[in-house]
Amino acid sequence: MVDVAGAVRRGGVFRLPADARIVDAIEAAGGVAKGANPDAVNLAAHVVDGQRIYVPRLGEMVPAVVDTPTATTTPAPVDLNSATVGELDHLPGVGPATAAAIVAHREQFGPFASVDDLASVHGIGPAKLDALRGLVTV
């Protein structure tokens, strides 16, 4: 079961197969609405039971919604200088390719000096950087 919200035609809670991907959840919600920014979402990522999937509108900041067992649990930010591809892949909007690009950039150019250095990683634009800003640290 996933909750699909934002710039989709019919937001709501949908029951999907265990092997479903974000693109399947968006299709279950009738597809993206006019003015949506599906590039801000990793469409290839697997869905997780209880997950909230938010499709922002063009120019909209992606809300940093984290699925947690309780509302009082706040996850620690992911350290860009020590995180594995698997840890980075769990960040919203970051799939395996972008996670691998972050690690490759770190290995080629050394540790990130600031979160803003993510802008130099292939596949991370201003919207994705803004969405990740509160979820990562150096």
Image: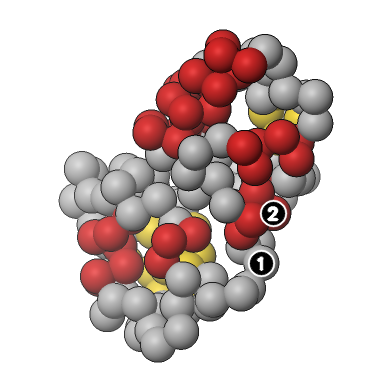
Q: Position of residue 61 (x, y in %)?
A: 66, 67
Quadrant containing the N terminus is: bottom left
Quadrant containing the C terminus is: top right
Question: For mark 1, does the 10 Å Cα neighbourhood hold few (<14), some (14 to 19), or many (20 or more) residues?
Answer: some
- Using the image as rendered, state which of residue 38 and residue 55 is in the foreground: 38
- Using the image as rendered, state which of residue 18 and residue 78 is in the foreground: 78
Numbered-mark total: 2
| Identity, as a three-letter code, of the amino acid under mark 2 | Asp
Q: Is residue 27 left or right of residue 76?
A: left
Residue 61: which disc? 1
Question: For mark 2, does the 10 Å Cα neighbourhood hold few (<14), some (14 to 19), or many (20 or more) residues?
Answer: some
| Identity, as a three-letter code, of the amino acid under mark 1 | Met
The residue depicted at 34 percent of the width and 44 percent of the height is: 45
Residue 87: which disc? none
Residue 5 visible, this angle: no
Q: Position of residue 123 (x, y in %)?
A: 48, 44
Q: Position of residue 64 (x, y in %)?
A: 66, 54
Above/below status of 138 relative to 12? above
Q: Position of residue 93 (x, y in %)?
A: 49, 49
Above/below status of 122 relative to 5? above
The residue depicted at 80 percent of the width and 31 percent of the height is: 114
Residue 101 visible, this angle: yes
The residue depicted at 56 percent of the width and 35 percent of the height is: 121
Q: Is residue 50 left or right of residue 119?
A: left
Above/below status of 59 relative to 51? below
Q: Are marks 2 and 1 in contact (CB under 8 Å)?
A: yes
Residue for badge 2: 130
